[in-house]
């Protein structure tokens, strides 16, 4: 004895797809309407996002010297991180180890930058994407 499998008709298939589509539209509208909120600068995911942003900044520079993170001026989040960072030019090269402990350059070689980064973090995949960066050189 064999059993006939019933194939869903177009009408029955559409009956469950329409509510699903409406739900996704409502969810997307809700997700996209979020506003940035201040966050703890010490959170693990935020610290990883800062490290990633500084690394990308150094990689994108033609300068052979590395910049290191000095201060968080603003930290906000809404599915992505918005961060305003100050960084200083070090005496270390950008691919040296332990740039965080490297001294800053002084005198005519001293350079400071203030950057705003927007980083998408998918911590469950350990995936980071730099969506935008804007940097301005500062003189202290």
Image (cartoon, grey):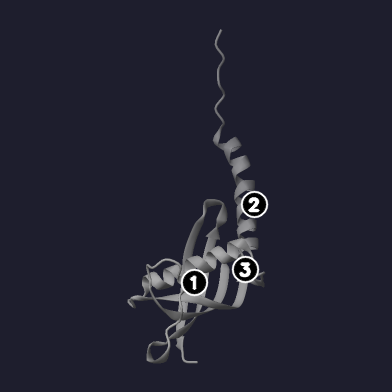
In the image, 108 versus 121, the foreground residue is 108
For the residues labelled 3 and 1, say whether their Cβ atoms are less than 8 Å apart.
Answer: no
In the image, 66 versus 98, the foreground residue is 98
Which badge, 3 or 1, comes first in the chain's sequence?
Answer: 3
Closer to the observer: label 1 or label 2?
Answer: 1
Residue appearing at x 64%, y 47% in the figure: 19
At which x and y percent is residue 94? 38, 71
Label 3 crowd bin: few (<14), some (14–19), many (20+), radius 10 Å: some
Question: Which residue corresponds to mark 1?
Answer: 100
**Is residue 12 shown above or below 63?**
above
Residue appearing at x 40%, y 72% in the figure: 58
* Quarter of the figure with residue 77: bottom right
**Is residue 48 shown above or below 124?**
below
Report, in whole angstroms, how far the alpha carbon at label 1 lies from the one at label 2: 46 Å
Label 2 crowd bin: few (<14), some (14–19), many (20+), radius 10 Å: few
Looking at the image, can residue 102 be seen? yes
Q: Which mark is residue 23?
A: 2
Which badge, 2 or 3, comes first in the chain's sequence?
Answer: 2
Mark 2 residue element = helix
Q: Which mark is residue 77?
A: 3
Closer to the observer: label 3 or label 1?
Answer: 1
In the image, 105 versus 30, the foreground residue is 105
Q: In this view, does 2 lie to the left or right of 109?
A: right
* Quarter of the figure with residue 73: bottom right
* Quarter of the figure with residue 13: top right
Looking at the image, can residue 80 be seen? no
**Is residue 38 shown above or below 22?**
below
């Amino acid at each position: 004895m064999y059993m006939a499998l019933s194939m869903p008709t177009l009408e029955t298939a559409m009956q469950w797809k329409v509510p699903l589509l409406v739900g996704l539209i409502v969810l997307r509208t809700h997700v996209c309407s979020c506003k940035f909120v201040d966050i703890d600068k010490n959170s693990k995911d935020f610290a990883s996002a800062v490290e990633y942003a500084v690394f990308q900044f150094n990689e994108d520079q033609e300068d052979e010297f590395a910049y290191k993170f000095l201060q968080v001026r603003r930290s906000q989040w809404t599915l992505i991180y918005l961060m305003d960072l100050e960084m200083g030019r070090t005496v270390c090269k950008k691919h040296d180890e332990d740039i965080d402990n490297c001294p800053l350059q002084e005198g005519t070689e001293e350079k400071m930058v203030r950057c705003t980064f927007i980083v998408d973090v998918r911590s469950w995949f350990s995936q980071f994407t730099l969506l935008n960066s804007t940097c301005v050189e500062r003189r202290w």
